[in-house]
Amino acid sequence: MPFIILIAGIILLILLLAWAKLNAFLAFLVVSILMGLCNGMNMDHIATAVQKGVGDILGSLTIILVMGAMLGKLIAESGAAQKITTSLVQLFGTNRIMWAMVMTAFIVGIPLFFDVSFVLMVPLIISVSKRYNIPVVYIGLPAVAAISVTHGYLPPHPAPTALVAQYHADLGMTLIYGLCIAIPAVIIAGPMFAPTLKKYKNPPPETFVPKDLNDDELPGFFNSIFTTFLPVLLIAIATVCKLFLPAENTAVKFFSAIGNPPIAMIIAVFYALYSLGLKRKKSMPVLMNHLIDAAKDISVILLILAGSGAMKEILTETGINTQIANLLDNLHVHPLLAAWSIAAVIRIALGSATVAGLTTASIIAPIIATSGVDPNLMVLATGAGSLIFGHVNDGGFWLFKEYFNLNLKQTFLTRSVMETIVSLIGLIGVFVLNTFIK
């Protein structure tokens, strides 16, 4: 019965959004309440779960997304994005600009959470799209593929790192094996898939489109790129310090503090106010107006994410993730395929790659010792499964849809397909590696 309720709830959500044209936040709330009632929850329990779900997702993302939007706005309005994209084109050439964006996104994505990486890359993606008349999805989806792959496969991201610990794997070997799979996954799901996306010519929302400035109005290249990637630098330094220095070391404590993602984003915004604003004789009222506009721009996305958090919590409270996992665990399939399948089904049901990965780990971890499978590959199989087919209960789905101005169908045919390609390449990759590692 819970499976029928889950499927009916997802169908109803899609109908409310696509047919009834209901606001996404309201649609999520309506479906979440109905699914809770159908699963036997009382209204007090439902209200508590909805509040917890909204609070959990906004508590972890609000600062990051708002600060990221503010940083992106300053980068766009100052001309820093224009300067970076112009320099990238000069370095790589117009014909290879997509590869430049993919490489940039992959490097940015290794130390940063998906949401942070996404909001940092969006101004650059849109600037390239606008300046060189390239469809924004065509140039943007390969970059998002790179970010997604690093999020699911590679430490130091939370889920892969936690899986390494739970599976008793080796972080260094997991990273090496992960790179062997991540690189072809990005190439296939990004630049190779991209030619099918040229028909999607949706212009991005005007608020995210940077205006063209004269060359003498642009900030310097070093200033532009340093300010843009300052959060990446701070978080990367913190990560390296944690890996190679003892926890009680003063440098570890200091860089861990300033390299915490929300703190790093706050520092970056204040630095951008100085380096791209005050230093270049921009007035504080003008700069504050940019920040206010950025906060307005991100508010709708925050509400959509809040709604998805409410639905995710209702599903978790009903225990459907455990039921699905136990069902697949009893099918007696190859451990790598079992890990991928369990993570994939939970991902589709709940929307969160991290929740899917960690839930799978609690089931798979006890059988690793007797399975004979390399635990590093189990980490990657789980991570690959947790990325499959993100849809309406996935916050990343809505970020992609809203920033790139797509409708539901277009988002399914672009971002959801890309995620599925990434997941399937990961599954194939772990089996290929498994034949050699044996």
Image (cartoon, rainbow, N blue to C red):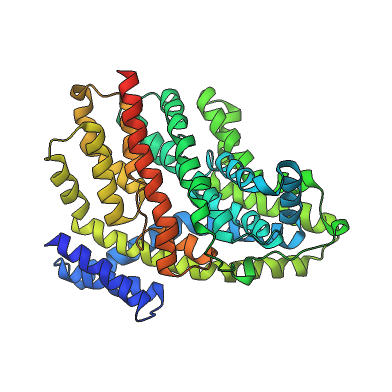
Using the rendered image of the protein, determine whether residue 113 is visible from the camera's viewpoint: no
Quadrant (top left/top right/bottom left/bottom right) for the N terminus: bottom left
Q: Position of residue 340 (x, y in %)?
A: 28, 40
Report x, y in % for residue 226. 72, 44
Asked which quadrant contains residue 92, the reply is top right
Q: Is residue 179 something that shows in the picture?
A: yes
At 60% from the left edge and 33% from the top edge, which residue is drawn? 237
Image coordinates of residue 46 in percent, x first then y, are 24, 68
Q: Nearer the viewer, residue 52 or 92?
A: 92
- Residue found at the very far bottom of the displayed protein: 20
Q: Nearer the viewer, residue 148 or 43?
A: 148
Left or right of residue 259: residue 178: left
Residue drawn at 45 percent across, 34 percent down: 155
The answer to whether 343 appears left or right of 106 in the picture is: left
Q: Does 199 appear above or below 263? A: below
Q: Which image quarter is the C terminus in? A: top left
Left or right of 313 in this view: 221:
right
Residue at (34%, 31%) from the top-left corner? 430
